[in-house]
Image: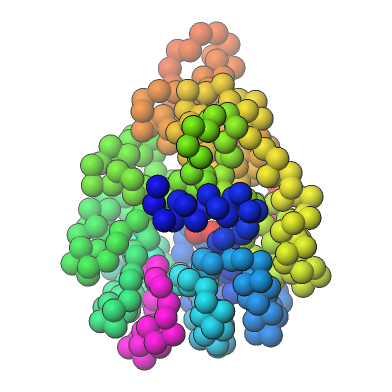
Amino acid sequence: MSLLAEMNQKALKLGLPISVHLDITYRCNERCVHCYLDHDDHGEMTTEEITDVLAQLADAGVFFLSLSGGEVLMRRDFFEIVERARQLLFNVKVKTNGVMIHEKEAARLRQIGVEQVQISVYSHRPEVHDAITKLPGSLKRTIRAIRFLKSHGLKVTIANVLMASNFADQPGVITLARELGVVYTLDPTITPKMDGDTSILALRIQGSELKQVFHNPELVGNAEEFCAPPPAPGEDIMEGFPCSAGHTACYISPYGDVFPCVQFPLPSGNVRRQKFLDIWRHSPQLNEVRSIRARDLPTCSTCAHVGTCTRCPGLAYMEGNMRGPSTADCEKSFQRTGIPSANMLTRTRAVSGGPLIQIQSLANSLQNHPFSGEDRLLTA
């Protein structure tokens, strides 16, 4: 067992939130076509409020801290926040588009002791990347930032969200990552906007293209992070947890709202009104999430993929039931293996009115669901 897996197991047994994703702003200098966020400031936490939350997270046992947005450098107090996080001995990961990072900023991140910087790159071609970000010259500035960060010895990861418009450029971004000496990761998931607008789901890549991703030897193990906590040796699959959300990890918005995960918009408390540890231990919503085992999933517990699926309960929640299947993940499992999920079989039979005739890309889009701005907080 790896050291990280061992840490996760111990945190799970002790009920500790070992990892927290904190968005410090939703403001951004880009307007990416696939972004779910409302970029207006509706009352972000102040510097004092954030530093107080950081102290509470440290007391609660948090070790891994991801600082993201929006664009983190839109906050003038960004480095003050990072410095405080490092003083509290968090392992800090920063997510940014890199546009505002020059040599001075790169040097300071290294001096403070940031563990890793994740930067979004959508194409190796400026005309494609810049069309997605809607910021002319953004690719050039982002690549320059990566070079500055690397020159100061920082670990850098390129994150590539796959869409129909940039799918063909995936090999080019991989080559770019190699040339820059950085890690490449991808994510084929597009989610609705905060206000419930599902029009951006039309940007998603199709099933045949997903199949190419999951069967590319260069990308095996890299298409997405599997969020479920590692099972204990000999553990019954049906007794396993569907996800780390609410068990060893959670998400906090710029307004202090706490959720099980950045992709699980179930309001569970607010650190402006309650102490973080009280929310973590006593939130009815988090406790409900923690009560769910694989055996409690009516459809997924009968599925051949139950032990290997990357099912996201947050996406399932957005489809109407956190105990239900996530059609997007059903599609991924199907494209990986060629074996239809229990959910796909059920839905296809319901449509055909009889025996299974064909399996289509049933997860081309998430079902519409009425979200309010308070309830719908996801990550790009």
Q: As displayed, is residue 178 above or below residue 285?
A: below
Which residues lie in the magenta part? 98-119
- Whether residue 328 is visible here, answered yes or no, is no
In the rendered image, residue 38, in percent from the top left (x then y), is placed at 61, 66
Q: Measured from the top left, where is residue 170 in percent x and y?
A: 27, 53
Residue 290, position as x, y percentages in the image? 68, 44
Q: Nearer the viewer, residue 136 or 221?
A: 221
**Front residue of this view, candidates 58 and 345:** 58
**Residue extending furthest toward the bottom:** 104
Residue projecting furthest to the top: 354
Residue 343 falls in image quadrant: top right
Q: Is residue 315 above or below residue 102?
A: above
Residue 151 is at least partly visible in this image: yes
Name which quarter of the figure residue 272 lies in.
Answer: bottom right
Q: Residue at 45% across / 12% down in the picture? A: 357
Q: Residue 50: x percent and y percent?
A: 65, 78
Residue ID at (77%, 54%)? 283
State the residue at coordinates (39%, 44%): 205
Instruction: Say whether residue 325 is magenta.
Output: no
Q: Is residue 118 magenta?
A: yes
Asked whether, in this view, residue 249 is left or right of residue 6, the answer is right
